[in-house]
Structures are given as structure tokens and as C-alpha cells.
Amino acid sequence: MTGIVPEYAHLRPMLQRDRASAALGMVIERDEPGQSVVRMLVRDDMLNGFAIAHGGLVFALADTAFAIACNEDDRVTVAAGADITFLKATRAGQTLTATAVRRIRSGRTGLYDVTVTDETGDVVAEFRGRSMATSRTVT
């Protein structure tokens, strides 16, 4: 399925087509070159077998913030790699916020840090993403 995700219609094209982030209920609060803020409510269907937020979904939130921050111009920029450190468990009903910032961008590569916090401001995870700009342009 292609096309614009209705709740993302006011956003730039890359985000308008991001069905995965929309399906997870992510809300984009800031979209600026080199930085972003994305929020997500942890739902019951996002919990693992220990009734805590599934790490893959915390990673997905951080990865979305990273993708927004590193797509700074008309070049399609993708992840070359990323890693995450989980620091605090979260549960259904909590709101997670991922804040991404550019550390450095040189030529086709970049390095971005994303901090994921809960609604109290406690750090839940730290994510570091490495980007690679491609020769394709955003359409």
C-alpha cells in the first residue's frame, strides 16, 4: 500500500509515507535539520512476555527520530548502522519521547545521538545511529 498516511499529511514526503511509525502511534513533535523529537504511547500490544515495553519498539521509536534528523536535505539518507543501550524498563500507559541530535555530518556520513525518555524525564535508552547519504533524491 502506498500513499499519504492521513495523520502525517502535513509533514514532508518521507514522513507522509511512513506507515510503520504511524501504525505504532508515533507523533512527530519536531522536524528540523539535524534534530527531531518523536513521541509514542506504550500500548498493551507493545509489551513483551515480562509486561514491559518490547525493546524492538523502543528501538523503532529512536530509529524514527534518527531518520528524521539525518534526512537533512534532498538526498535520501539511510542508516549505515545503529546501536542502543536500554537503561530503564517501561510499561503500558507510559509515554516515551525520542530526541535526536546530529553530532557530526561529513560528506556522505553522519553520526546522531538519540535519547529516549519517559514522561517523568528519566532516560529509558540511549541510541547512536550512523547515517549514509545515497545518490538518490527525495521525490
Image (tube, rainbow, N blue to C red):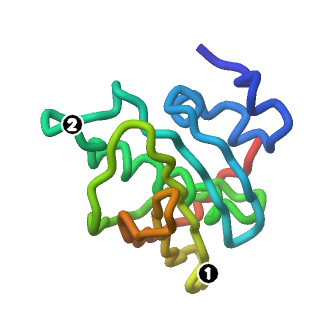
Report crowding for label 1: few under 14, some 14 to 19, many 20 or more residues within 10 A (C-alpha). Answer: few
- Spot occupied by residue 83 in the image (x, y as percentages of width and height): 31, 66
Judged by depth in the image, the label closer to the viewer, 2 or 1, is 2
The quadrant holding residue 125 is bottom left
* Residue where numbered disc 1 is placed: 107
- Spot occupied by residue 52 in the image (x, y as percentages of width and height): 25, 43
- Spot occupied by residue 74 in the image (x, y as percentages of width and height): 77, 57
Mark 2 residue type: Ala
Check disc 1 and report its element: helix, strand or loop. loop
Residue positioned 75% across, 33% down in the render: 8
The quadrant holding residue 13 is top right
Mark 1 residue type: Gly
Extreme top residue here? 1
- Spot occupied by residue 5 in the image (x, y as percentages of width and height): 70, 24
* Residue where numbered disc 2 is placed: 51
Check disc 2 and report its element: helix, strand or loop. loop
Residue positioned 49% across, 75% down in the render: 113
In the foreground, 44 or 1: 44
Labels 2 & 1 near each other (Cβ < 8 A): no
Question: In this rendering, would 110 be left or right of 31?
Answer: left
